[in-house]
Image: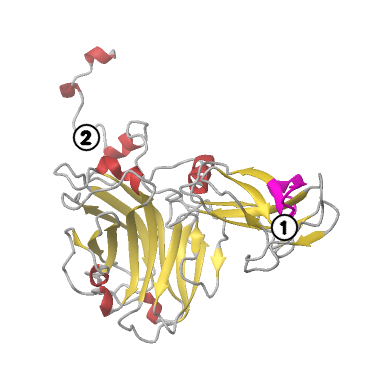
Amino acid sequence: MPLSKIVANSIADDTITSDQIADTSVHGRRNLFHNSEYRVAQRGTSFASASTLDYFADRWHYARTGTDNSVFTVSRSTDVPSNQGLEFSGRIQSTTAESAVDADDLVYIRYIIESQDLLHLNYGTSAAKSLTLSFWVYSSSNTGNFAVDFYTSDANRNQNKTYTISAANTWEHKTITIPGDTSGSGFAADTGYGLGVHWIMLAGSNWGTGATTNVDSWGAYSGSTFANGFTATSPFLTTNGVFMIAGPQIEVGTIATPLERRGIQEESLACYRYYYDGRFGTNDGPASSLSRDAQYPHVRHAIVDFPVPMRAGPNVSIQSGSANSMDRYGRGQETCYPKAENIHPEHFQNIIKYTDANQNTTANWTDSGNYINRAGYKANAEY
């Protein structure tokens, strides 16, 4: 049929569904999260006795404060909801239980969206747009209300939404819609912290558990509003208690569309903006220097480009196959406590040798002239 013949009343009711539209290119990029399928995991995929801020996949991490008894294993799991085409979930497990919830206890999963990627939401104006969050969740405890906190850093405001889990040890799909924030300062056009989304799994009274101040509406943030609405019995009060999420998506509007699928190359490059592991701990990594400076013998020449421009000048760590060293390309390892110099979002220039891990006192590189030193590196520009 020619396009000129297609009119609204020629399309039967219910012929076109939101699922069908979502499977085309009509929507463009919908999911404001990167790596929602957790396929990129440069730091590793399992962390026993996890410390706070351990990432089970790039851009996705768990965090904790208080919790003086519990011990957690944080991992990327292959336990996923059936028939959804998902390979991985994010899994938090209490290998040692928290004996009781103290006032300052808090455990959550977090994702942070860069501020300049949110300008189209028009926050701080009467045209502020709604967002819809959808995800799969699994918990070994299903008593009470769980909560998701939405926090905007520039305006220092938050809103909490609650949800319930119908059956323990069962994958369930949840959809949450939040209205746009018409107050506050909106999002800055910069690389800073824009919107943080927090799945709360355990919280004490200092974080506002049970209170309703910022539930279902935006308001000024304080620590006592972070977990407003959360009344759930945490799965982490039991040894080997489990909480998992899979396939999270956040998109503009009030309708949850099917999870947007992206190729591994696109997802990898998006993640490299925030963290990149350039074969850290290997002798043949890309941190390669061809010569020592003639005037400043503690400096080796290097120009190392990152795969993509990073969010900000990153923290860079350099190491070969031996701790605190660089490989001398067949001439052995040189213990040098190497430090990158002139770090920018696009690259770093030069590598400095130090006498110890404090990196206060420089030392001369062993080889003068045109001798190669090499190592891997990792660069971190996360929040």
Residue that mark 2 sits on: 14
Q: How many marks?
A: 2
Name the foreground residue: 14 vs 297. 297
Q: Is residue 285 in the magenta section?
A: yes
Q: Amino acid at mark 1?
A: Ser
Outermost residue, right direction? 331
Outermost residue, left direction? 126
Name the foreground residue: 373 vs 250. 373
Q: Amino acid at mark 2?
A: Asp
Q: Residues within 10 Å of mark 2 (few under 14, many from 20)?
A: few
Q: Main secondary structure of the magenta part?
A: loop
Outermost residue, bottom direction? 99
The label nearer to you, 1 versus 2, is 1
Q: Which residues are magenta?
A: 282-301
Say above or below: 254 vs 162: above
CA separation, marks 1 and 2?
61 Å
Residue at left 26%, top 66%? 164
Residue that mark 1 sits on: 320
Q: What secondary structure is found at the residue carrying circle 1?
A: loop
Q: Position of residue 207 (x, y in %)?
A: 27, 74
